[in-house]
Image (cartoon, rainbow, N blue to C red):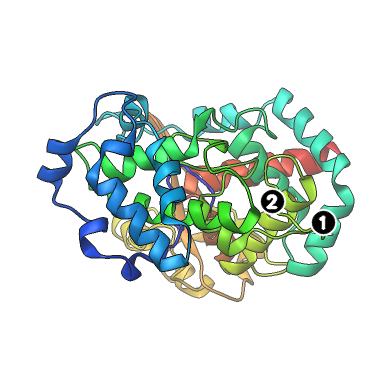
Amino acid sequence: MPLNTLRRRLLLGAVAALPAAALAAPARTRRRNAAPENARYADHPEAMAFADAVAAAHGLDAARLRQQLGQAQRIETVRRLVMPPPAGVAKNWAAYRSRFVEIPRVQAGLAFWRAHEAWLQRAEERWGVPPEIVVGIVGVETYYGRVMGNYRVVDALATLAFDFPPGRRDRSAFFRSELEELFVLADREGSDPLAVKGSYAGAMGLPQFMPSSVNRYAVDFDGDGHIDLHGNGADVVGSVAHYLAAFGWQRDMPTHYGVAVPVDSRDRAALLAPDILPSFTAAQFAERGARLDTAGQTHDGPLALVELQNGDLAPSYVAGTQNFYTVTRYNWSSYYAMAVIDLGAALKRGL
């Protein structure tokens, strides 16, 4: 599952198979045992117990796993970056969009599209995901490989697994699961888990998949015997399309329709209540005073009224379909999904 930043759509690994003591020590214990910046986890009792548990669960060499995890370092920057943004920062869709739908990124996206056109066509034939959505995701995630992250993934995941910062909901169990998945992935691929670079949250490659998403959804699309999301465009394209298909992408369905929101604030609030989850028919939109565009009026399936705030200006609205919701499974944000869709549309126009 891609990043996201922290992929909300990502599934936990085989956490239940591991001893509770190795997975979820009390927060006060984690803080007491917290290592200083750049300290290695070889001297961290919980980390070493975790290594033994993972090795036992997957038939891996425990001594080797201890040695690998023991070289991971605690990174204070990672702990800082995982914290939520300051309260009171107004959302601004226009400003957010401008970061991604820009001439240099569109040019880079067109180059990526042309270089991998055959694989994009093959992915669409197999999974029904249009090229512009796949290329839009890669563009928003990593600027087509220009910004994939320079943290060692093992450092990022170990830091968040064993020294998750206080002050927000504790997600250390999630990151322990992802760390487990990283070692499983490295064993399967015969790669060095210490060599993999990625984001501060542990996401990897051009599509920014978390280790669990690599293990579940990444595909060897060109059949060369390995999955490479850092340098193999075929695998990147196939993996993104497969991921979206697995989360419900519907072939030939639009992502959204134009809509004029109800004048009555109560009707508007009722339609906004489910957030991005498609919950209303086109007829129910009309009953609440929402006016869909011509194509939207004949849509067969549930819709969501999606609000995109514009700072002090009036919000923007779209009626999101199941496919809009599917894009948010890559990153649980309507702003992210709309940026992917708009970048993809700009790329399609530019061909």
Which quarter shows the C terminus?
top right
Tell me, for residue 129, which label it has, or none: none
For residue 311, above or below residue 322: above
Residue at image location 74% in from the left, 40% down from the top = 231
Quadrant housing residue 110: top right
Q: Choose mark 2 or mark 1, whichever is in front.
A: 1
Which amino acid type is marked by label 1?
Asp
Can residue 8 be seen by looking at this rendering? no
Residue at image location 48% in from the left, 60% down from the top = 60
Q: Residues within 10 Å of mark 1 (few under 14, many from 20)?
A: few
The residue wearing badge 2 is 133
For residue 46, above or below residue 91: below
Disc 2/disc 1 C-alpha distance (Å):
25 Å
Can residue 160 be seen by looking at this rendering? yes
Which amino acid type is marked by label 2?
Ile
Q: Residues within 10 Å of mark 2 (few under 14, many from 20)?
A: many
Residue at image location 30% in from the left, 48% down from the top = 48
**Are circles 2 and 1 on residues that touch, CB within 8 Å?**
no
For residue 195, above or below residue 227: above
> Where in the figure is residue 241, as x and y percent of width and height?
69, 59
Q: Secondary structure at mark 1?
A: loop
Question: How many numbered marks does the figure carry?
Answer: 2
> Where in the figure is residue 4, as x and y percent of width and height?
48, 43
Q: Earlier in the sequence, mark 2 or mark 1?
A: 2
Q: Secondary structure at mark 2?
A: helix
> Where in the figure is residue 238, as x and y percent of width and height?
73, 57
> Where in the figure is residue 235, as x and y percent of width and height?
74, 52
Q: Would residue 166 appear left or right of 301 to someone viewing this image?
A: left
Q: Would residue 324 appear left or right of 241 to someone viewing this image?
A: left
Quadrant housing residue 344: top right
The residue wearing badge 1 is 224
